[in-house]
Image: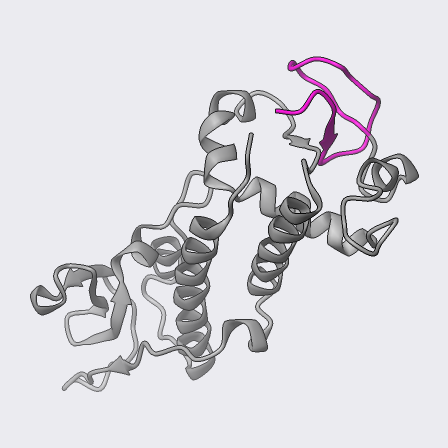
Amino acid sequence: MAVGAIAATDGGASNGDGPSTTPSARSPSILSAVEGQVDGEDYPDELRVFDYIYGVLHAPDYRATYAQFLKIDFPRIPYPPSPEIFAHVAEKGGQLRRLHLMEDAAIGATPYPFSGAREDGDDNVVEKPAYVPLPQAGGEYGRVHINPDQYFENVPALAWEFHIGGYQPAQKWLKDRKGRALSFDDVVHYQKIIKILTETDRIMREIILPL
């Protein structure tokens, strides 16, 4: 990590690798820290700084390198080493931000049709969510069942298993609705969750951050 670092929270400066906080992205000192790091821009706007920080926090190399430290302290963000790295990480961070805000333009198509019907007419009730891999897809795709007869199709296994913190959103969302019937809006929302998790995994893998 660079000697200096941008912290993701407000607070006072620190010069060590231990617990610390530094000024927020709104502070002039933070904007000064990235002065000249974007071609043609003396001071990147605050949203681009936020996107850079967001991209860093999702960079696999950053997460792996500082995994233990992140468990005990606020994240420390390395200064961008070059205009190209700042632009690249900020772009990926912006893509992730728009996805996580559930902007329709960022999410795009959701090719996970909801299929099946129940003979008893008790449609769309979440009973015991389960993921069933499709052998013909090599286990990379499968069906997310909400009950024995109804399911979301073509769901990537990585989306079903994806972790955020200590839980798996694709699984937790359905488990939290056990015993309830999903509305049309619920079905659409879950399809978006699957797409967001899938795209989050893809974008994270594209982030190149030298440490």
The residue located at (42%, 68%) in the rendering is 195
Which quadrant holds residue 176? bottom left
- Between 204 and 86, the residue placed more toward the observer is 86
Q: Is residue 130 shown above or below 107?
A: above
The residue located at (75%, 34%) in the rendering is 9
Location of residue 179 in the rendering, given as x and y in whole percent from the top left corner? 32, 65
Residue 52 relative to residue 119: left or right: right
Q: Which residue lies furthest to the right in this view?
A: 28
The residue located at (39%, 61%) in the rendering is 198
Q: Is residue 108 shown above or below 144?
A: below
Q: What is the number of callouts on the image?
A: 0
Residue 80 relative to residue 140: left or right: right
Q: Quadrant of the N terminus?
A: top right
Q: Which colour scheme is used?
A: one colour
Location of residue 20 in the rendering, given as x and y in whole percent from the top left corner? 72, 20
Residue 189 relative to residue 148: left or right: right
**Magenta span contains residue 21:** yes
Location of residue 37 in the rendering, given as x and y in whole percent from the top left corner? 77, 44
**Magenta span contains residue 166:** no
Which quadrant holds residue 91? bottom right
Q: Which residue lies furthest to the left in this view?
A: 135
The span picked out in magenta is 1-22
Location of residue 111 in the rendering, given as x and y in whole percent from the top left corner? 34, 78
- Between 68 and 89, the residue placed more toward the observer is 89
Q: Is residue 67 shown above or below 170?
A: above
The residue located at (66%, 31%) in the rendering is 78
- Between 146 and 114, the residue placed more toward the observer is 114
Q: Quadrant of the C terminus?
A: top right
Of helix, strand and loop, which mostly describes the magenta segment? Answer: loop
